[in-house]
Amino acid sequence: MSSARQKRHAEERLCLLAAHSPVVVVCGARQVGKSTLLDMTFGAESETVVFDAMQDIEGARRDPDLFLDSRGFQPGGAPRRPRLILDEIQFAPELVPAIKRRVDRLAVPGQFLLSGSQQWQVMKHLAESLAGRAAFVDLEGFTLAELAGKGGRPPWLAAFLLDPEVFVASDRPRLPLPRTVTEQVFRGFMPGVQGWPDAALDSWFAGYVRTYLERDARAFGDVHDWAEFGRFLRLAAAHSGQEVNAAQLGREVGLTPQTVRRWYATLAATFQWSELPPFHTNAVKRQSLRAKGYVTDVGLAAYLLGLPSANALLGRREWGALFETAVVGELRRQLAIVAPGATLSHYRAHGGAEVDVVIDHGGRLHPIEVKGNSRPHRQDAAGILAFRAAHSGRDIAPGVILAPAERAYAVAPEVWVVPWDVA
């Protein structure tokens, strides 16, 4: 089976939501497998229509009611298939009110399955118009378990959040990944690129960036200088894994801080950028601290930085930030599956102590540090130990240092090194 058809963790959640909600929307960047997921899960029992920015497919934008009526999705009508998959719905927003009218008349679970690659358009139109009628699934690239062909079982974060003490004390195997850590970080996690040869990766990502700039970012409507925005995208990649400083980046690009913040928002709204808010027990002080930002896919970040090969990653100053980008992305993807209600943040004390990721799950805090070397030691646990000391009154789980290590081992009281590719 090709990597593009790998079983996804999100299938179970998609089926659960389709069994209860009349409309299910799968959101995510282009090339993360939204269409493939819907087709693999419901394609045999569904009719599928793929929309396009340039064409009004079957008059859906011009006459959305007629479009739906022709498929039997009308009062008293019998649709040709029990489900209708509407792919790239952001190109036919006129359909949303028509779908709402039909759902209000007769709410059949899983009747409409939608996908979209522009968060702002999809979420704004659907969340407002279909409030209480639609459920959402956010999809990103593959998890490590999916790459290893283990997408049918829960990823390791499920066991860790359930019982961290048992997890760190257990001897869990590593995943049988098809590539080394540097090869996977260089390639990234988007399904479409997994089957491409190393020599052609730059061509794949060049096409991805060009399509993104010409279609997704342009459709967002908040960018006027596309060459300048492309340069901003590359500089954002150079700041992946760092605190977001709009004034500093603005000086580097020659833009105002307001424009930088607006363009960061554009990247986030089109699924190319994500941020971890600062952790602080005081909500007012938290507002004065900076978030940490990450390019959503680390392979795209490596391409934007102009790195020539996987072997070129080691020994480069970018390695630590890229490995952190990869691991934070993995945590984000796993949390969306096993604990959608959990929150991710980062910690930085005034004295300089840092923790890359703090997961708040049910009130219990899980500090996680990321290190790009294969043998972290006690000094690498300093941030987690400082975090525990500063919040001694909170319920804090054993800390974890995720690294390209061969095995799990303790480096300090309540702090364990865990391989980044643990099963």
Image (cartoon, helix red, strand yellow):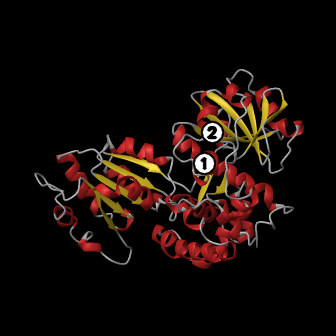
Q: Secondary structure at mark 2?
A: helix
Residue ranking furthest to the front: 1
Rendered view: 410 above or below 133: above
CB atoms of marks 2 and 1 within 8 Å: yes
Rendered view: 25 above or below 253: above
Q: Of 266 and 330, which appears nearest the observer?
A: 330
Q: Position of 199 compared to 162: left or right? A: right
Q: Which x, y percent locates residue 182?
A: 76, 60
Which callout, 2 or 1, points at the residue further toward the start of the chain? 1
Which residue: 60% across, 74% down? 204
Placement of the C terminus among the 4 image quadrants: top right
Rendered view: 356 above or below 186: above
Question: Which residue is disc 1 drawn over?
Answer: 145
Q: Of 213 and 339, which appears nearest the observer?
A: 339
Which residue: 83% across, 41% down? 352
Q: Which x, y percent locates residue 96?
A: 29, 58
Q: Which x, y percent locates residue 150?
A: 57, 47
Amino acid at dot 1: Ala
Rendered view: 323 above or below 193: above
Which residue: 69% across, 49% down? 327
Residue ranking furthest to the left: 76
Question: Which residue is disc 2 drawn over?
Answer: 156
Q: Position of 108 compared to 403: left or right? A: left
Q: Position of 90 compared to 288: left or right? A: left
Q: Secondary structure at mark 1?
A: helix
Q: How would you rate the neighbour count of disc 1 (Cα within 10 Å): few for under 14, some for 14-19, many for 20 or more?
A: many
Amino acid at dot 2: Trp
| Mark 2 and mark 1: Cα distance apart in space | 9 Å
